[in-house]
Amino acid sequence: MSSLDGAVAIVTGAGRGLGKAIATELANGGAKVVVNYSKSKEPAEELVKAIESNGGEATAIQGDVSNPEEAEKLVEQAVEKYGKLDILVNNAGITIDKTMKKLTSDDWDKVVSVDLNSCFYTFKPAMEHLTESGGKVVNISSFVGQAGNFGQANYAAAKAGIIGFTKSAAKEMARHGVTVNAVCPGFIETDMFADVPQKVVDEKIVPLIPLGRIGQPEDVAKAVKYLCADGDYITGQTLSVNGGVYM
């Protein structure tokens, strides 16, 4: 695999879960990583220390990327710190799971704002810098955005929107040599998945997965790293990392 030595990457929502694994994988590949967080200050700072202790370079920058001004400031601070931007990974996301009968407009707006709107809010100010570097953008969607899911209308809509946004951005940025792709994880062992009862996991979820196991954050991180390090001729695509649960 190609090296990411010297590349500068922003990973949103990187304090824990998928974002943490992605930031670690990119740092291990040689990238200087901006660990963005909204509220998880201590986990983000601990991640920076872990990356640095492993010989890498990273910095933690707070910013609520569902706010356009804060998202723009995040990009500005990253470029001020490292002088350029090569990689943008839009990973920040939340869930508020309810059936549509119980789902409120506030529940809808919060999830769409964090999961979908943030992709545009970070991408917009990053465009100029990514154009200069011929950079890579990876947006973290979900198989729920492809298949839908009971009680996750807001999350499914946001994640499906990411796929459409990715394709449009890829077409606009291709002339600048910038690739834009989406990664769709399946069931992954993260904090977001931790609330699912083990009996449900063993009896209802795992049997749906052809590979017979719940995915690990590192499974997704490796896919992101591949697109960033070796995906020079891949753009506008949706890479499913789901153990075959949705084909």
Image (spheres, rainbow, N blue to C red):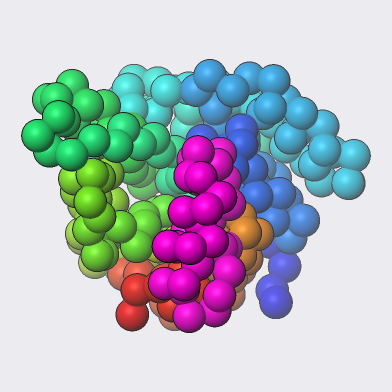
In the shown orientation, is residue 114 left or right of residue 33? Answer: left
Closer-to-camera residue (117/107): 107
- Residue 125, by quadrant, is top left
Residue 35 locus on image (x, y percent): 62, 35
Q: Residue at x 35, y 73 (%)?
A: 246
Q: Residue at x 55, y 75 (%)?
A: 212
Closer-to-camera residue (34/38): 38
Residue 174 locus on image (x, y percent): 32, 68
Residue 192 falls inside the magenta stretch: yes
Q: Residue at x 68, y 27 (%)?
A: 43
Predominant secondary structure, magenta span: loop
In the shown orientation, is residue 201 left or right of residue 181? Answer: right
Q: Is residue 107 visible?
A: yes
Which part of the image, by quadrant, shows the N terminus?
bottom right
Residue 83 locus on image (x, y percent): 61, 38
Relative height, residue 155 to residue 138 (above, below): above
